[in-house]
Amino acid sequence: MTPPRDPRVSVICPTFNRSRAITDTLDSVSAQTVTDWELLVVSDGSTDDTDDWVRDRARSDPRIRLIRTDRHGHPSGPRNRGLAEARGAYTAYLDHDDLWFPGHLRVLLDAFADGADFVATGFEVSDRHGTVTSASRPLEMCWHPEIQTLGPVFEPSRVAHRSGLAEQVGGWRAGGGAEDWDLWLRLADTGTRFATVLDRTVRLLSDVGTRRHGITLRRRMTVAVFEDAQRAHAALRELRDDRHEAALRGARTTDLRAWLRRMAASRQFVRPAGWAGDPEVELTDGPAAPGGSWTDLVLVPDRGRYLLALPLACVTAEHALRVQSLVRRTQPGQFALIDQVTDRYGGTPPDAVAHESGGDRS
């Protein structure tokens, strides 16, 4: 097959030492029903035979191109190199351990034809044995700027956007956090038109060896500040006590329903294409609270004080501050209960400072 002179879609796939396993990912692109694409496989200084396997596939499908870079140790550098080389009108991303179903690009292009700037599709999650363990639901495909601020929605393999948008907001940034969350948020802040579709066109790998499970959480959202270590430990133990679980669960559900109701009434709220369901009806008691789960609370020494905090995967301190402010507004019931407990032990609400995580944790 002759590579298209002007491909509609540029697919960027960063990789490092994936070896033969990358061929399944590459083959899932070659199997697309849309054929005018280019696949830029950016090898991040691989030291095994990954590059050889990519070259082998490129010989049989010249739309595949290997780009080799020095080692970055992070996918943002390779993705930025891919952006610099891309020629398509649209840019799609594919992590080297995920797979596309044959209609993925067709679904994306249909959404772009309807006026979207940024599109995310539905997904399946599988383990390393190929067993599907979960799949996207309509509620997970709803979008609003506040949802984007509070949670790392939309893995890169599910996303495409009009080419040039990422560069306009500074491209991919490396750091101790979810780099996709960071980029999507910057795009949202500029008024990018987001769209989602229910079609499950991507299979994501969930395995302890993947990077998604190894992100260092350098930022945190402070819940309460203590001057005394013993009181701080006591407050944390009580918040983790099972006797508060039912009350916190009930407050979480109430907060989520009120939040969804408010967002759904906004013009900025995005439902998956063709879905007319009620987000509140889709809500169950299962989802974690926006911004993280209270069971993840940690105690962090900080300049003579003790912070009760929730680790965050934010790339920047400014984003962590936004999360802290918005979570307080969207979870009033939960914070009323949290504040009752922490006040009893001498805790005070946090000041408007977002810190990097450091020191010992309890």
Image (cartoon, rainbow, N blue to C red):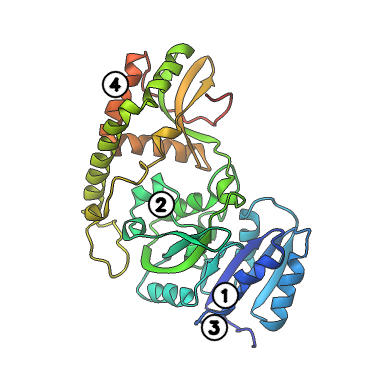
Q: Does label 3 or label 4 sit earlier along the sequence?
A: 3
Q: How crowded is mark 3: few (under 14 residues within 10 Å), some or many (20 or more)?
A: some
Labels 1, 3: front one: 1
Checking the image for residue 189, the label placed there is 2
Q: Which residue is under mark 4?
A: 340
Q: Which residue is under mark 1?
A: 29
Image quadrant holding the N terminus, namely: bottom right
Q: Which is nearer the eye, 303 or 100?
A: 100
Q: Does label 1 or label 3 sit earlier along the sequence?
A: 1
Q: Secondary structure beneath disc 2? A: helix
Q: How crowded is mark 4: few (under 14 residues within 10 Å), some or many (20 or more)?
A: few
Q: Secondary structure beneath disc 3? A: loop
> In the image, what residue type sits under mark 2?
Asp
Q: Which is nearer the eye, 219 or 292?
A: 292
Residue 309's place in the image compared with 183, above or below, is above
Q: Residues within 10 Å of mark 1 (few under 14, many from 20)?
A: many
Measured in 3D between alpha carbons, the distance from the residue under mark 4 to the one under mark 1, in whole angstroms, is 53 Å
> In the image, what residue type sits under mark 3?
Thr
Measured in 3D between alpha carbons, the distance from the residue under mark 4 to the one under mark 2, in whole angstroms, is 35 Å
Tell whether 272 sits left or right of 257.
right
Labels 2, 1: front one: 1
Checking the image for residue 35, the label placed there is 3
Q: Residue at x 52, y 70 (%)?
A: 100
Residue 133's place in the image compared with 100, above or below, is above
Q: Does label 4 or label 2 sit earlier along the sequence?
A: 2
Residue 266 visible? The answer is no
Labels 3, 4: front one: 4
Q: Secondary structure beneath disc 4? A: helix
The image quadrant that residue 138 belongs to is: bottom left
Q: Does label 3 or label 2 sit earlier along the sequence?
A: 3
> In the image, what residue type sits under mark 4?
Gln
